[in-house]
Amino acid sequence: MIVPVYEPGPTFDDLIASLDRQTIPPGAFEVLLCDDGSGETTRARLAEVARTRPHVRVLTLPHTGWPGTPRNHGIDAARGRYVFFADQDDRLYPDALRALAAYADAHTSDVVIGRVVGIGRDIPRSVFRRDIPRAELGRDPLLALLTPHKLFRTAFLRDGGIRYPNGRVRLEDHLFVMEAYFRARTISILASTPCYAWLKNAGSASSSRIDPETYFPHLEAVLDLVERNTEPGALRDTLLRHWYRGKILGRLGGKRMRRYPAAYRERFLDAVIPLAQRRFGSSVEDGLPLPLRVRSSALRAGRREDLLRLADYDAGLRADARIVAAEWTRGKIALTIRARVLDTDGEDLTPDGIGRALGLVIPPGTAAPADRVELRLEASPDAFERRIPGASAPGLRDARVVIDPVRVFARQDPSVGGRLRAHVRRLGWTFDVPLHADPGILRALGPSPVWAGRRCALVEGRDGVELRRQWPAGIARDLIARGARRARGMLSASRRALSAAPRASTSPGS
């Protein structure tokens, strides 16, 4: 376990406490606190942590101001078969290290991506839909989460010379993880066990606005790494498309671009227009969904005004989703949902409408994912899973979505439900909106039958429909009465059976 440390705050105690709670014995793992030149107070604090825990060591290092070098020292000093990288503000779930090591042992993995739970931040849901013992780059969702919070085989890192870049390097995690991905024989995804709680830290480097002149050369270093390790073709295009979408096109959309000060926006475009022309060809652009392909076409042609008009158009789009019918069927809630995506004129979003509104010709053959509605449950930030299993359907008009309360509330957690949100996808645009319904539909639906002493109901909340697990008053009395009636019925049936049975003879000749 390698933790780069620099003047940690009070949440560092939560990390140490989470390590103390690991189900793997302390003698079976070590913790390397790689101190990046902290002051005397922090050094004393780290020394006290190590003094009371024999499996904790402190590496006191010169200050670099970036986590890469401390992590490299941790790789060099590690004694264990595996290393796991954690940050000082985060924490681990109790069974994390045991489960990760066991999964790596079972599949001879060089890299294991354990389930990451976002606390105050969104985690791509595609990564952790299922366990994948042998994930494949370009096919499985390995690019969706390139943070360092993973398990690596120590000998694999050392033998391959896989290290973080030293110094202040943006996207250093991407450089390290992608190098590991290209060299690994087996990469595994452990989705079924929550391993790492990743907390939102407002002071992190990733939360600040980038400096275009210094940021994008670091992005090109990642692109160089990809091109060195792939041949021209579908795999390379898929990988390059990931960074094009997330690091360039994603920063040019809607409200985000309109919030940029004019001078900053021009600096940004000065940096990314030649980069897009140089590094992302038509084969990369062809695989983009419609909104990003239109944006890419304008960017690569240097049409700055078109990019601004497209951003205004994006910012004006809106969606809504409503329940128009609901019924209980075999213990499940069957909902008919009507969703709409409207453009800036209040008209349904269509490809022709996009072209007319923007004064652009939509490129032929533009990829447009199928329209879809998916329901999610908005509970506490610590919720293990916000996506409702199986609650999705194709289409937007009268989409039939089924909610299984047993699957929603099967996990052992104190949650009693939360607000339902609709994830609406139309022509490649996606919207996350509250789900609404006429109160009469919810009253007519009523609560579920009793299961495990509880009920489930859809109720009208302040900001939309809520799915709630309930403990109705009198439920215990109802269950007791039902049990008593069943017992009386069984007793009566037994008496009738006895009275109807032939009596045994007691004569001497029997």
Image (cartoon, rainbow, N blue to C red):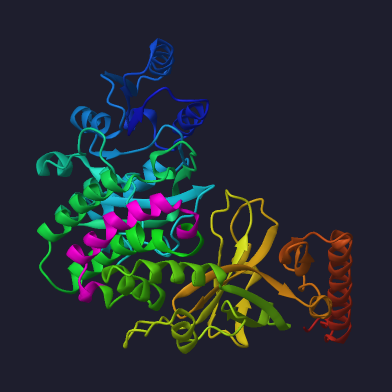
Q: Point out the stretch of residues depicted in magenta.
A: 257-284
**Would residue 138 appear left or right of 328 to someone viewing this image?**
left
**Residue 133 visible in the snapshot:** no
Q: Measured along the vertical axis of the image, is residue 410 above or below residue 396? A: above
Q: Measured along the vertical axis of the image, is residue 417 above or below residue 424? A: above
Q: Looking at the rendering, in which quadrant would you find the N terminus? A: top left
Report the label total: 0
- Please name whichever residue, 454 or 414, is drawn nearer the observer in this view of the structure: 414
- Please name whichever residue, 474 or 185, is drawn nearer the observer in this view of the structure: 185
- Please name whichever residue, 42 or 445, is drawn nearer the observer in this view of the structure: 42
Magenta stretch mostly in which secondary structure? helix
Q: Measured along the vertical axis of the image, is residue 53 above or below residue 315? A: above
The quadrant in which residue 65 appears is top left
Q: What's the residue at 89%, 72% (across, down)? A: 485
**Residue 271 visible in the snapshot:** yes
Q: Measured along the vertical axis of the image, is residue 180 above or below residue 393? A: above
Q: What's the residue at 11%, 41% (across, down)? A: 161
Q: What's the residue at 36%, 55% (across, down)? A: 266
Q: Is residue 464 magenta?
A: no
Q: Position of residue 144 (x, y in %)?
A: 35, 59
Q: Position of residue 369 (x, y in %)?
A: 41, 80
Q: Looking at the rendering, in which quadrant would you find the C terminus? A: bottom right
The quadrant in which residue 493 appears is bottom right
Q: Position of residue 61 (x, y in %)?
A: 26, 20
